[in-house]
Structure formats: C-alpha cells, structure tokens
C-alpha cells in the first residue's frame, strides 16, 4: 500500500482539521493539504514522471516540503530528501546518482545548482511551482507494493561519499507503527514542530502525525532556535519534536538562562548521536518527563531500539543510570543480536557489533551491490556500532567499530572517556579519538570545550577517579568548538585530520 493513503484518508474524515502552519499562521487544513499534493502529482504525471521515478527535495523546512513529498507519493514516485545545507556540488552528485527526474528547491537554493546538473529544477513560490499546483487534482493514488521504493536517503557521508539507502513503503509504515506502540500514540490535537532538517529523522517522523491528523508546524526561522521553539510550544501545546542531542543541550541551556519552562512540550525524541547522562539528567530536571530516545540508522530508520519516557525519567530503579545510559530495548518489529566478528552471539554484558533484522531494515543500497553485501548478511544488518546487551535487553552503545581504540592490547571505547569528562562541571563538550603510539599501538586524545579555564591536571584527576588509568587521555587539546556535520554529529574524521596536521 502507498503510504500516501494516510493523508488521503485523513482528508476524507477531517478535511477542516488544521494541518500545515508557518509559525502560528495556518497555511492549509487537511483538505487543502491533500488537494495541493494531488495537484502536484498531476503535474508530475504530465511531465512523464511515473511509478518508481525519483523526485528530489532540496528544500528548507517549509510547508511546501510536505506537499511535494506526498504529491510525489501520490504519483508513485520515490522521494530523495537532500539536506538544504549541502553544497551544490554535493547535491548535484546525489541527483546524478539517484537518477532524479525532478528536483524541487526552496528559493535561493537553485543558485549555483542549475549549472551543475541537467535535472530540471522547480523553485517553490516561483512560476513553475505555481503552475504545478494549478493542475487539476489527480483523483487516483498510484498503487505501490509494500516493498517498492518510497524514500531514497543518502547517508551523511562523514567517512566518504554518501550511499543511497533504499526505504520502502513497508519500512516507513512499520517504523510509524513502532512509534505508536513503543513510544506513544499521536493524537489529533498534537503538533509536530520541525526544527531539525526534514531530510533526516524529523522528516521521517511526519508520517505518524499525518495519519493521526496532527498539526505540522514550520518555524519561520527555517531551523532550530530555542526561543522560537519554546514560543511555538506554548502556543500550540501537545508538541512533539525530533532533536539531535546537541539541540537538547542548546534548548536546556537557553531555557535555564532565560528562566523558561517547557510549557506545551509533550515529547522530545532524541537520536542521531551520543546523549551523555549528564546532559539528559539536566534536561529532564528542567523540563520534566518529556524525553524519549530512539536508536536507528538510515539503514534501519528510527527503528532499532527505543527508550521510552518512563525509563528516561525514572530515578527510582536500582540501575536507572545504566538504563539511562542505554539506547533502550529492541523495538517491536525487529530482532537484535550482539555478535563477534564472525557473527557468533555474545553473552549478556559482552561488547560486540549490534546486528538487527526485521521489517524496518533496508533491502540494500541504491545501485551498490558491493556495499549491500558487506552490510546485509543472511538477513541481518551489521550496523557497524559496538554495544552490549544486558540480561533485561537494554542495549548500551559503545562506539562505531571504527572509533574503538586498542591501547596495549586493551579495547577503549571513546564514549566511556567522554562520559567521564562530561561529568566535570567546567566541560561542556568533548570528543575522544586515538593517535598512533609506537609502544602501545594507540593512545587516547581528548578534544575539550570548556566554559571556564581548567588545566590538564584537574581533568586527569577527574578521569582517574572514574575510569581505569589506561583509558584516561594522554593529551588534552582545548578547542573553542567541535566540528559537526549538518545533523549535529561530531566529525571525528576532521579531528583526526587536525591531529595529524599538528603532529
């Protein structure tokens, strides 16, 4: 079934229900949302774009994004979401690899792109876009089988050129069902605020909100501004948001400094990078039990584990800190294993690679059988993430397998060291990497962002009180900020390059 049926059904039952908002201003109800998407679908068909073709969205967070997304699905096409912060050359490479038939852009984003690609560009708000939305709405929704391509997501490419992850209609439907069963049920009176890029997790999370008839709120800033988010949450109430951990940190810091509470916030789902215990404890203490965690990858979107609100907020269980430091338990639609390099299961408490299979796992990478064969084996997705599972099924991430350090024959997981350093009151951010050492193989180097002067000896004493001596950093490098990609993930590749250049 085409996932776009969820919009059509909501428009049937509640056409006057508010749907799209730009800030506090209404843009369309569900009837208008559905009609605009059907017009766009008719325009695509008139251009010869048919079932299985790809329509790229190189757009900022605006209401037209969802109109184009669902319109493409109505026409049977697959959506290719592209982060609006990418360079035109990066965007052109994705368009070429995806074989896109059309690219919808926000005003200004087509500048410099038209010279790099032969793919037709349509800018929202322009004459071409207005013409497409003036078509007679298509009465039919193109049939799509469950395993047909719906969403072609390109990985962030921190270690090389991005690969296209194929997401099917079934994957997105099951992911949405898991949210409802493993996190919470979305209500018609709820509102999703899109402060993170719609090309990533925030965009994937619109679907369960469409099915429920909830409101979709696009901040006028087009991005994440803590003051704006808190104002919108207070206005709409019942607010759901997807945030990267760095966004949670920013929101908490701003709210505490400004004396703001979390009025109107119902759920903040955090994912996309390590959330350290010190940061989430501070956030819960300030905002209350509104946080839940998802662990997923593009290859299994938002669909591997979940740590619901009750576990994030619990402070009474004897092992609450361990649970809080985990990414939760397997979601309803998947099986999880922790395995060694040969794929053999490891007992509870031992660290190995996290493996997952189920209906939220991708069928493979777009036109990349080599990478697919390496990542999918015997039905299991080898995530590349190292972790362990306790006797109750809680999974704790250690690091990406490539980030693990081996010093003197002992494994060191950077996250352990980072967690310890972040407990120091003067440390605001930290990233740990390895440096080659002639005797030990590797040694630990910590890049540290502080909010006041602190010396290496104090950090060393702090670490020695919390972790084994061999795990403590041998070098502390103080930096004003950590390099991050467009999704807020720390770019350890950049830190390695910086370290190599200074050696």
Image: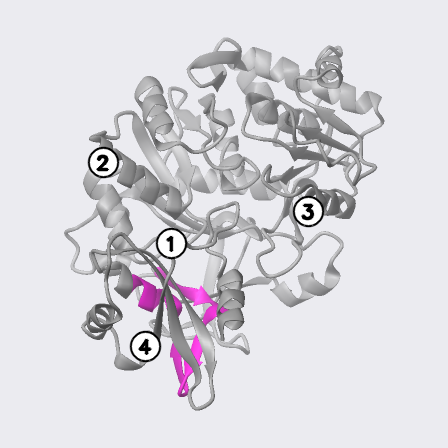
Compared with 384, 470 (above or below) is below
Q: Is residue 188 visible?
A: yes
| Circle nearer the viewer, 4 or 1 | 1
Q: Give the foreground label among 4 and 2.
A: 2
Q: Position of residue 289 (x, y in %)?
A: 24, 39
> In terms of image quadrants, where is residue 348?
bottom left
Rounded to the nearest angstrom, the CA distance separating label 1 from label 2 is 20 Å
- The answer to the question of whether label 3 and label 2 lie on touching residues, with beta carbons closer than 8 A, is no
State how far apart marks 4 and 1 are (Cα): 24 Å
Residue for badge 1: 480
The answer to whether mark 4 and mark 2 are in CB contact below 8 A is no
Which callout, 3 or 4, points at the residue further toward the start of the chain? 3
How far apart in space, not on screen, are marks 3 and 2 (Cα)?
38 Å
The residue carrying mark 2 is: 257
At mark 3, the secondary structure is helix
Q: Quick one: 399 or 478, which is closer to the camera? A: 478
Q: Where is residue 80 in the image (x, y as percent from the top left)?
A: 67, 39
Say which label, 4 or 1, has the lower sequence index: 4
Magenta span: 395-419
* 1 or 2: mark nearer the eye: 1
The colour style of the image is one colour
- Tag shown at residue 90: 3
In terms of secondary structure, where does tag 1 sit? Answer: loop
Q: Which of marks 1 and 2 is nearer the N terminus?
A: 2
Circle 3 residues within 10 Å: few <14, some 14–19, many ≥20: some
Residue 401 belongs to magenta span: yes
């Amino acid at each position: 079934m085409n996932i776009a049926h969820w919009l059509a059904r909501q428009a049937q039952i509640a056409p006057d229900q508010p749907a799209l908002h730009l800030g506090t201003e209404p843009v369309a109800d569900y009837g208008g949302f559905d009609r605009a998407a059907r017009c766009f679908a008719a325009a695509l068909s008139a251009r010869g774009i048919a079932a299985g073709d790809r329509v790229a969205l190189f757009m900022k967070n605006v209401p037209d994004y969802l109109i184009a997304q669902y319109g493409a699905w109505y026409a049977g096409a697959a959506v290719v979401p592209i982060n609006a912060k990418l360079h035109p050359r990066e965007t052109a490479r994705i368009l070429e690899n995806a074989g896109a038939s059309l690219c919808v852009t926000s005003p200004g984003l087509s500048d410099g792109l038209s010279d790099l690609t032969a793919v037709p560009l349509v800018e929202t708000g322009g004459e071409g876009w207005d013409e497409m939305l003036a078509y007679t709405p298509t009465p039919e929704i193109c049939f799509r089988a469950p395993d047909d391509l719906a969403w072609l997501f390109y990985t962030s490419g921190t270690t090389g050129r991005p690969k296209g992850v194929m997401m099917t209609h079934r994957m997105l439907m099951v992911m949405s069902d898991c949210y409802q069963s493993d996190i919470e049920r979305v209500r018609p009176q709820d509102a999703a605020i899109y402060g993170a890029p719609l090309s990533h997790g925030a965009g994937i999370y619109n679907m369960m909100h469409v099915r429920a008839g909830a409101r979709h709120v696009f901040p006028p800033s087009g991005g994440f501004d803590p003051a704006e988010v808190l104002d919108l949450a207070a206005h709409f109430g019942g607010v759901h948001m997807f945030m990267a951990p760095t966004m949670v940190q920013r929101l908490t810091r701003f709210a505490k400094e400004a004396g703001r509470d979390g009025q109107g916030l119902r759920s903040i789902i955090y994912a996309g990078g390590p959330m350290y215990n010190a940061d989430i404890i501070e956030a819960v203490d300030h905002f209350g039990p509104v946080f839940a965690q998802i662990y997923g990858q593009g290859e299994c979107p938002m669909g591997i584990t979940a740590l619901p609100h009750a576990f994030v907020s619990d402070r009474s269980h004897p092992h609450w800190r361990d649970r809080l430091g985990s990414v939760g338990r397997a979601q309803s639609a998947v099986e999880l294993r922790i395995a060694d390099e040969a794929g053999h299961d490891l007992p509870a408490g031992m660290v190995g690679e996290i493996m997952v299979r189920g209906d939220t796992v991708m069928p493979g990478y777009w036109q990349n059988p080599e990478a697919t064969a390496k990542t999918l084996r015997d039905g299991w997705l080898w995530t590349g993430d190292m972790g362990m599972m306790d006797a109750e099924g809680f999974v704790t991430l250690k690091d990406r397998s490539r980030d693990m350090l081996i010093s003197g024959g002992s494994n060191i997981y950077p996250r352990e060291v980072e967690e310890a350093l972040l407990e120091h009151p003067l440390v605001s951010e930290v990233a740990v990497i390895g440096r080659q050492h002639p005797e030990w193989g590797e040694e630990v180097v910590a890049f540290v962002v502080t909010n006041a002067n602190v010396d290496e000896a104090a950090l060393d004493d702090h670490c020695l009180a919390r972790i084994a001596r061999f795990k403590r950093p041998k070098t502390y490098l103080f930096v004003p900020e950590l390099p991050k990609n467009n999704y807020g993930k720390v770019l350890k590749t950049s830190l390695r390059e910086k370290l190599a250049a200074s050696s």
